[in-house]
Image (tube, rainbow, N blue to C red):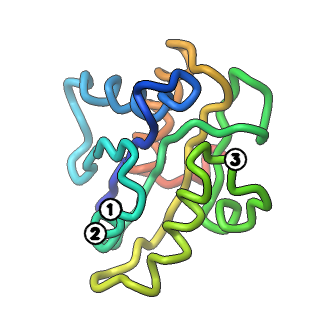
């Protein structure tokens, strides 16, 4: 199965830069698994839709708020993302949940078989960034089951 790791956030807002810090860490990996693509999604919002039309597994990495304690990482599956009652949990207004709501309505390609979010709560430490990077690669290649 092919997989994409899409790191989203805003480099200029420290509490929203977690996904992009993970992207930077992933870029430094010397041996990246075959079939896994890493994408700096930044603040692309709905412009990410074409990247989700390839099927396979999609792992989003982003800052979250209100899911766990600061300094911890949370894993949410597609349904948990959609069921989140407060869209501000994703620090992008209705960003990710809205993107996933629109996706099946406009998709011209193949929908992802699996979508998960690796969420970093609070301002990320180097240890959190490293853990989230390794976690996102493991999920992209093997699936999220070992982290549940």
Q: Which residue is mark 3?
A: 89
Image quadrant in which you'd find residue 33:
top left
Q: Is residue 85 left or right of residue 47?
A: right
Please report contact status of discs 3 and 1: CB closer than 8 Å, yes or no: no
Q: Secondary structure at mark 2?
A: helix
Q: Please tell me which residue is depicted at 35% across the width and 82% down the height of the picture.
A: 107
Please report contact status of discs 3 and 2: CB closer than 8 Å, yes or no: no
Of all residues, the one furthest to the top in this rendering is: 126
Q: Is residue 81 visible?
A: yes
Q: Secondary structure at mark 3?
A: helix
For residue 54, above or below residue 13? below
**Count of numbered circles in the view:** 3
Q: Nearer the viewer, residue 123 or 13?
A: 13
Q: Secondary structure at mark 1?
A: helix
Please report contact status of discs 1 and 2: CB closer than 8 Å, yes or no: yes
Q: Which residue is mark 1?
A: 47
Q: Please tell me which residue is depicted at 23% across the width and 53% down the height of the picture.
A: 35
For residue 104, above or below residue 27? below
Q: Please tell me which residue is depicted at 33% across the width and 57% down the height of the picture.
A: 3
Q: Is residue 141 left or right of residue 108?
A: right
Q: Which residue is mark 2?
A: 50
- The Cα–Cα distance between marks 3 and 2, rounded to whole angstroms, is 24 Å
Q: Is residue 1 visible?
A: no
For residue 19, above or below residue 77? above
Q: Is residue 42 left or right of residue 131?
A: left
Q: Please tell me which residue is depicted at 61% across the width and 43% down the height of the picture.
A: 91
The nearer-to-camera label among 1 and 2 is: 1
For residue 74, above or below residue 134? below
N-term-proximal mark, 3 vs 2: 2
């Amino acid at each position: 199965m092919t997989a994409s790791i899409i790191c989203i956030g805003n480099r200029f807002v420290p509490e929203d830069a977690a996904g992009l810090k993970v992207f930077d860490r992933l870029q430094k990996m010397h041996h990246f698994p075959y079939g896994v693509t890493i994408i700096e999604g930044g603040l692309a919002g709905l412009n990410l839709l074409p990247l989700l039309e390839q099927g396979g597994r999609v792992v989003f990495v982003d800052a979250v708020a209100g899911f766990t304690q600061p300094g911890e990482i949370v894993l949410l599956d597609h349904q948990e993302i959609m069921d989140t009652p407060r869209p501000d949990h994703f620090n992008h207004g209705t960003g990710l949940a809205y993107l996933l709501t629109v996706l099946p309505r406009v998709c011209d390609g193949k929908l992802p078989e699996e979508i998960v979010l690796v969420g970093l709560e609070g301002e990320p430490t180097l240890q959190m960034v490293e853990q989230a990077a390794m976690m996102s690669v493991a999920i992209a290649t093997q699936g999220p089951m070992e982290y549940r």
